Image (tube, rainbow, N blue to C red):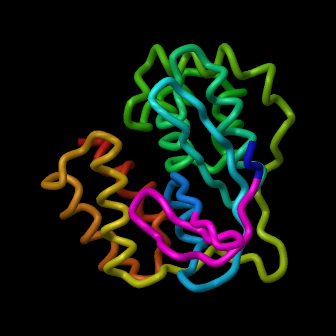
Amino acid sequence: MIDSLHGEVLTIGLDHAVIECSGVGYRFVAGPPTLARLTRGETTRVLTSMVVKDDGVTLYGFADDAARTMFLKLQTVTGLGPKLAVACLSVFEPAELAALITAGDAAAIKRIQTIPGVGKKMAERMALELKDKIDGLYEPAQPGPGQAAAPARGASLVTEQVIEALVGLGFTDKAARPVVDTLADGNPQATSSELLRAALTQLGSK
């Protein structure tokens, strides 16, 4: 089992990246919050989770243990697979999602439903099956000294990354592109994670 990767970032795609470790390039799937923290050519460490299925083995990458832990917890929910778990973590920070799940009220369920692919039944199932597993596990994220949000890696790359993520979550390019472009123009310093969450809020209200 591959628990983490440490090496040079070779490639950063729209939904994946490649890190070279001892001469071997490892490709892993990741959401915008993780990809936004990577810089091509720099050496970094990414935590991973290996998912083995009949059709192959997929490596998923995470910037921190909080995200990886939530990814694993989410997959214990009946009918919730790794792709949907990544979608959940693309919309909400782990602590924020945990707070919604443990609240379990109508307002929280409605917010969880803003995740593409999560309907009312799945949101209710998440609250029911995960509440006891994650209650008290996360504290609200508080950035420490020198831990500001990762800067955007260039407006064009960030917007394309967010659009691709939205398409992967079920929206059409035609619907997603104008929303993302408008948001990016209004906040050129926004990270891909921030843009994705803002775009989902707007698209979900239409």
Predominant secondary structure in magenta? strand
Residue in the image at 53% along x and 43% along y: 86
Residue in the image at 43% along x and 27% along y: 118
Q: How many marks?
A: 0
Q: Is 135 above or below relative to 38?
A: above
Residue 199, image x, y percentages: 35, 56
Viewer-side residue, 14 vs 97: 14
Magenta residue check for 50: no
Residue 144, image x, y percentages: 83, 73
| 30 to the left or right of 75 | left
Magenta residue check for 8: yes
Viewer-side residue, 131 vs 73: 73
Q: Is 31 above or below relative to 170?
A: below
Q: Quadrant of residue 20?
A: bottom right
Residue in the image at 58% along x and 75% along y: 9
Residue in the image at 64% along x and 78% along y: 8
Quadrant (top left, top right, bottom left, bottom right) of the N terminus = top right
Residue 87, image x, y percentages: 48, 42
* Residue found at the far front of this picture: 23
Q: Which residues are magenta?
A: 4-25
Q: Quadrant of residue 21?
A: bottom right
